């Protein structure tokens, strides 16, 4: 490479991610994060379908039915020990 050539380095200052947020009443938790909105929207749609499929079961069992939404989030705002949440949170014995 010659010295008179410029090399373009793209800076990755944009640490914004798209979060799928699970909510139960006033409680909410980041269920999953994605680099782009389309992937997050796809995951949110899948999670909503899973909840709808089991909604009657959840109601009969007296379990809360989570609601999913999208929100931009910075990587620095994620909790240090954050882990993804299953679509049906009770699978891990925990709710939001």
Image: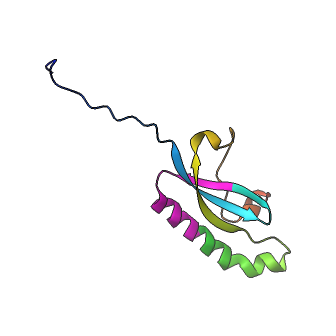
Q: Residue 11 in magenta?
A: no
Q: Residue at x 43, y 37 (%)?
A: 12
Q: Residue at x 80, y 62 (%)?
A: 26
Q: In this view, does 89 lie to the left or right of 70?
A: right
> Which corner quadrant of the image does residue 44 belong to?
bottom right
What segment carries the magenta color? 30-46
Could you tell me residue 4's position as x and y percent? 14, 20
Q: Residue 43 in magenta?
A: yes
For this orientation, the residue located farthest to the right is 62
Q: Is residue 81 left or right of residue 17?
A: right
Q: Residue at x 67, y 73 (%)?
A: 51
Could you tell me residue 82's position as x and y percent? 67, 44
> Which corner quadrant of the image does residue 68 belong to?
bottom right
Could you tell me residue 16's position as x and y percent? 52, 46
Q: In this view, does 60 lie above or below 34?
A: below
For the N terminus, the image quarter is: top left
Q: Residue at x 77, y 65 (%)?
A: 24
Could you tell me residue 86's position as x and y percent? 66, 60
4 vs 66, nearest the viewer: 4
Q: Is residue 9 above or below residue 42?
A: above
């Amino acid at each position: 490479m010659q010295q008179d050539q410029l090399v373009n380095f793209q800076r990755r200052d944009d640490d914004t991610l798209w979060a799928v947020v699970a909510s139960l009443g006033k409680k909410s938790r980041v269920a999953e994060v994605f680099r782009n909105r389309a992937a997050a929207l796809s995951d949110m749609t899948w999670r909503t379908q899973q909840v709808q499929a089991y909604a009657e079961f959840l109601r009969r069992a007296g379990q809360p039915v989570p609601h999913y939404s999208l929100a931009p989030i910075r990587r620095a705002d994620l909790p240090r020990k954050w882990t993804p949440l299953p679509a049906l949170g009770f699978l891990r014995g925990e709710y939001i």
